[in-house]
Amino acid sequence: MRYFDTSALVKQYFVEPGSMAVRELLKSGERVFTAVLTYAETHAAFARRKREGILSPTATRRLALRFDKDWESYEVVLLNRELLSLARQILYRHTLRSADAIQLASALLLARRAPQPQWVFVCADQRLCAAASVEGLQPVDVTLTH
């Protein structure tokens, strides 16, 4: 089972380090698990690139619509008290941003609810991958794969 952090999932829409690795992982046909937060974070990434002049308004709309269509097929972990409590604990154990703690907490809740031999945590952030490993997940940093 694979959980995708926004930092990895957003790479399927761009050509940058890690993009090919994400596309290959997504081709497997396995279900995509992610946090509800990924929706806002992905649209924020599109908006930022538009503001910076990297994306045209037309390209931004096209990517946003494509992502919204993809979003319908994802298994989404919703925010709740249990998740926020776990994110709080993670923030005191690891040096992470709040959004990253929510992503990691989402993956950990999934792993607790649906035990598998190994939950893979796909991201593009070395610090977050390190924290995922300490928490018992199998991290895959897509920026380091070829």
Image (cartoon, rainbow, N blue to C red):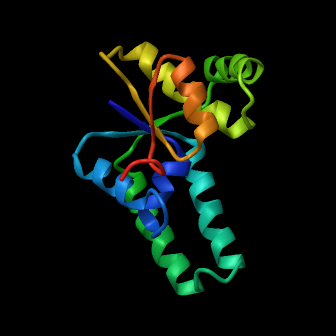
Q: Is residue 6 above or below residue 114?
A: below
Look at the image and tell me whether residue 112 can be seen: yes
Q: Quadrant of the N terminus?
A: top left
How far from the left and from the top, in percent, is residue 72? 38, 51
The image quarter in which residue 104 lies: top right
Q: Could you say which is closer to the camera, residue 19 or residue 29?
A: 19
Q: Is residue 33 above or below residue 138?
A: below
How far from the left and from the top, in percent, is residue 40? 62, 53
How far from the left and from the top, in percent, is residue 27? 24, 52
Q: Could you say which is closer to the camera, residue 82 or residue 125?
A: 125
| 86 sits left or right of 63 in the view | right
| 129 sits left or right of 102 in the view | left
How far from the left and from the top, in percent, is residue 91? 74, 24
Residue at x-position 61% and y-position 31%:
79
Look at the image and tell me whether residue 68 can be seen: no
Q: Is residue 103 above or below residue 59?
A: above
